[in-house]
Structures are given as C-alpha cells and as structure tokens.
Image (cartoon, rainbow, N blue to C red):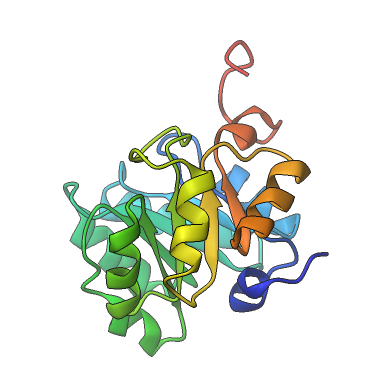
Amino acid sequence: MLKTKMTELFGIQHPIMLAGMNWITEPKLVSAVCNAGGLGILAIARCNPKETRENIKQVRDLTDKPFGINQILIGPGAKENIAVAIEEKVPIINYSLGKPWFVNDVHAYGGKVVGTIAVAKHAAKAVQLGCDALVITGHEAAAHGAAATSMVLIPLVASMVKVPLIAAGGFFNGHGLAAALALGADGVSMGSRFMIVKESMVHDNFK
C-alpha cells in the first residue's frame, strides 16, 4: 500500500489507474483492478445509454470498491452517457476532449471529476472548471497524446496546479511509477499493460 494524494482522493490502496479503453475495459477487468486496490475505469464512449447503465451495474455486482467511467465528450451520445453515470452516482467521472458541463452535478452526490489533458495550458483551465484531479497524457500514450513527453509534461503541470496528477503514457511497472512520483505525479494510469492480464478480453494472440 502506497499512500499519495491520488489514493486519498479516491479511497483506493494503490496509486494505479486502469485507463479507459473502448472494447477493452469491460466490467470484468475494471472490477479486477478495483478489487486489487487500484482504480478501474469503465470506458463507455462506445455504449448507448442502456448499455452504459448495464455495464455500471455489472461492475457493482463484481466489486464494492470505488470505480469510474471514461467518456470522450466530443463523441456522439456523450451527454446521454454522462447523464446515466450521474443518475447511477458513479464515484469518478473521467473525461477527455471537451469541457465538463457536469461538474456541479457530480459534486452534488460526492463524486469526483477527473479531466484528461495532453497540453499544459489546459491543466489550469480544467482545474478552474472544477476538476478534482487530472490525467496527464504524455506523447508516449497510445491515444490522445500531444507533442510533449511525460518527462516534460508532468513536472510542468505539477508546477501549475495543486490537484492530484495521474501520469499516463509509457508507464507499465514499479520503476515507471517511482519515476512518475519523482516527477511530481501522484500515481499512474496504465492501459497497454492491463491489456495482457488474464481478466482482459483481448485475444491471446494479441497479448
């Protein structure tokens, strides 16, 4: 167990987050990460509202630990999916590619909002809009990264904001976690690393 601002904010044991990945972070994998003490994130951008509600309920059937959902805000169905997540009082709402109009609604039931950013100037704006934490996505990330690498972006953002920071992009083991913490982050988000675990639905040939 490693205590950081990230673990304290979310009520988890380990400063490790499962990145939301469409068609991959399904309820089984999400709940496995949660039950192991990390933060599982359910990707819902590919879902319609009915599927979103069903998946949230499946996660709750498999774990009683904190979990979150991830939604790309510029995609179709974003407003409807976020509305379902709020109705279901999902503990953590993680968004990317857009401005969160739902912060007050999430805070009203005690939930947390986590913005995903890849450009330093967007960090201060996200905090101004009410984000409780930020995922800092370096160039090494599999998706939604920009030009700046994690090595550059993390300490820069850490000097700008005070909310917990979750480093994403190129992190896959304890060495990377230690490096992220040294750079000023409070935890890491991993996607590709979790794709190869037994709870992942990815085909064995790909793993």
Q: Residue furthest bottom?
A: 108
Q: Residue furthest top?
A: 205
Residue plotted at (63% across, 74% down): 5
- Residue 7 at x, y = what percent? 67, 70
133 to 137, vertically: above or below: below
Residue plotted at (46% across, 86% down): 110
148 to 204, vertically: above or below: below
- Residue 150 at x, y = what percent? 50, 45
User: How many marks are shown on the rendered structure?
Assistant: 0
- Residue 134 at x, y = what percent? 44, 64
Residue plotted at (67% across, 36% down): 199
In the picture, measured across the screen, residue 179 lies left or right of residue 162, that is right
70 to 201, vertically: above or below: below
Residue plotted at (73% across, 40% down): 173
Q: Nearer the viewer, residue 185 or 195?
A: 185
- Residue 1 at x, y = what percent? 83, 64
Q: Residue furthest right?
A: 1
Can you see residue 19? Answer: no
Q: Nearer the viewer, residue 9 or 53?
A: 9
In the picture, measured across the screen, residue 152 lies left or right of residue 3, that is left
Can you see residue 10? Answer: yes
In the picture, measured across the screen, residue 90 lies left or right of residue 182, that is left
Q: Quadrant of residue 85?
A: bottom left
Where the C terminus falls, by quadrant? top right
